[in-house]
């Protein structure tokens, strides 16, 4: 199958937005307000942290709040000069959204955390570990969530069984992203 | 080599049309992060609610339209209406043969 036709291509997966399992989006926003817009989205890999961060960024922009979204990962490192550049351009009406806060150097994190108290509207991060900032939400998944997402992405006429999807979920230890990547590979081998 | 076209509007028009922006661009689709590139841009100021415009784009040397299992490269023309930001997109094929190049296909 051509990449462009694959139902699990990145751009199609990108249309699936965050679905809170035990709360609502409005409650999350209320809690974030209580936390003075300084909070962490925690959770294991593939549990929706980045998706939620992107959704919140969109919400902030719709409310007229300026955002500064930074992705930190293996391909996009956030080193000390990058951290200082960010802080030097920061204005008090901006909320910093940092995806992968546990991946930056400890000294950079300390500086960012301290500086944004007085020089930014807020600081919202994602992290695999808890404790960097008060937890806004601990993201989690379940087999039903995977079945729901796959049900929306897979083409008509090809039904992946519940047994298959539950086994996939277990094999990837609840990492939905990894499950969807495996499904991409599965479909890519089809004619 | 260039790409010629006709951009027209009819039916119910947007309430206010400031300008049209026409982009010739490519993007990737598939398993990895999406890459994008803009080859040409055109701007039509004060186009009115009805009418048509001829245009042409000189085509670049590449990249050609192709597809494999992991990645596809897709060319498209994108027309955006300002200030409403309504956008329509038409995919086109850009290759020496006029057909999308299929990676791994035997000739």
Image (cartoon, coloured by chain):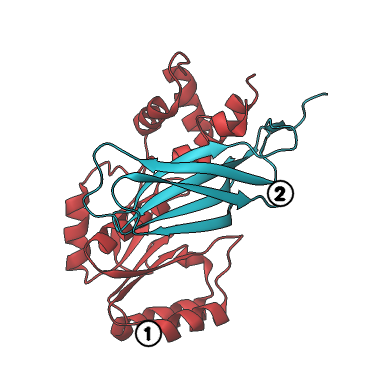
- Classify mark 2: residues with Cα within 10 Å, few (<14), some (14-19) or many (20+): few
Q: Is residue B105 above or below residue A81?
A: above
Q: Is residue B84 visible?
A: yes
- Measure the C-alpha gap from mark 2 to mark 1: 46 Å
Could you say which is closer to the camera, residue A42 or residue B75? B75
Which x, y percent locates residue A186?
60, 26
Position of residue B107 in the picture relative to residue A180 (left or right): right
Q: Chain of mark 1?
A: A
Residue bearing mark 2: B62
- Label placed on residue B23: none
Could you say which is closer to the camera, residue A141 or residue A130? A141
Kind of element beneath mark 2: loop
**Could you say which chain is coloured red in the image?**
A
**Could you say which chain is coloured cyan in the image?**
B
Residue at point 52%, 66% (across, down): A103
Q: Nearer the viewer, mark 2 or mark 1?
A: 2
Position of residue B52 in the picture relative to residue B95 (left or right): left
Question: Residues at marks 2 and 1, common chain?
Answer: no
Q: Is residue A87 above or below residue B78?
A: below
Q: Is residue B63 above or below residue A188?
A: below
Kind of element beneath mark 1: helix
Q: How many numbered dots are placed on residues in this image?
A: 2
| Quadrant of the rendering where the C terminus of chain B is positioned | top right
Could you say which is closer to the camera, residue A108 or residue B56? B56
Which x, y percent locates residue A165?
46, 24
Residue at point 48%, 15% (across, down): A158
Position of residue A185 in the picture relative to residue A161 (left or right): right
Which x, y percent locates residue A63?
21, 63
Which x, y percent locates residue B92?
57, 37
Could you say which is closer to the camera, residue A40 or residue B34? B34
> Toward which corner of the image does residue A68 lie, by quadrant?
bottom left
Residue bearing mark 1: A115
């Amino acid at each position: 199958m051509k990449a462009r036709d694959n139902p699990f291509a990145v751009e199609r997966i990108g249309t699936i937005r965050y679905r809170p399992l035990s709360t609502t989006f409005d409650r999350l926003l209320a809690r974030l307000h209580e936390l003075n817009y300084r909070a962490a989205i925690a959770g294991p890999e593939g549990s929706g942290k980045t998706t939620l961060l992107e959704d919140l960024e969109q919400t902030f922009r719709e409310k007229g709040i300026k955002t500064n979204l930074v992705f930190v990962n293996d391909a996009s490192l956030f080193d000390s000069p990058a951290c200082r550049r960010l802080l030097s351009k920061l204005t008090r009406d901006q909320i910093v959204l940092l995806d992968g806060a546990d991946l930056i150097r400890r000294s950079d994190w300390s500086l960012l955390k301290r500086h944004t108290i007085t020089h930014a509207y807020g600081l919202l991060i994602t992290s695999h570990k808890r404790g960097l900032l008060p937890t806004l939400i601990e993201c989690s998944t379940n087999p039903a969530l995977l079945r729901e997402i796959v049900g929306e992405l897979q083409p008509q006429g090809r039904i992946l069984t519940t047994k298959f999807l539950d086994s996939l979920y277990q094999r990837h230890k609840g990492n939905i992203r990894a499950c969807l990547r495996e499904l991409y590979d599965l479909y890519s081998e089809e004619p | 080599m260039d790409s010629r076209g006709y951009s027209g509007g009819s039916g119910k028009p947007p309430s206010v049309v400031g300008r049209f922006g026409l982009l010739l661009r490519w993007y990737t689709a598939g398993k990895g992060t999406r890459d994008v590139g803009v080859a040409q841009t055109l701007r039509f100021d004060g186009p009115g609610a009805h009418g048509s415009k001829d245009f042409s784009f000189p085509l670049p040397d590449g990249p050609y339209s192709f597809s494999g299992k992991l990645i596809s490269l897709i060319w498209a023309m994108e027309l955006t209406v300002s200030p409403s930001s309504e956008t329509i997109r038409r995919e086109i094929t850009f290759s020496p043969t006029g057909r999308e190049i299929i990676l791994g296909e035997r000739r």
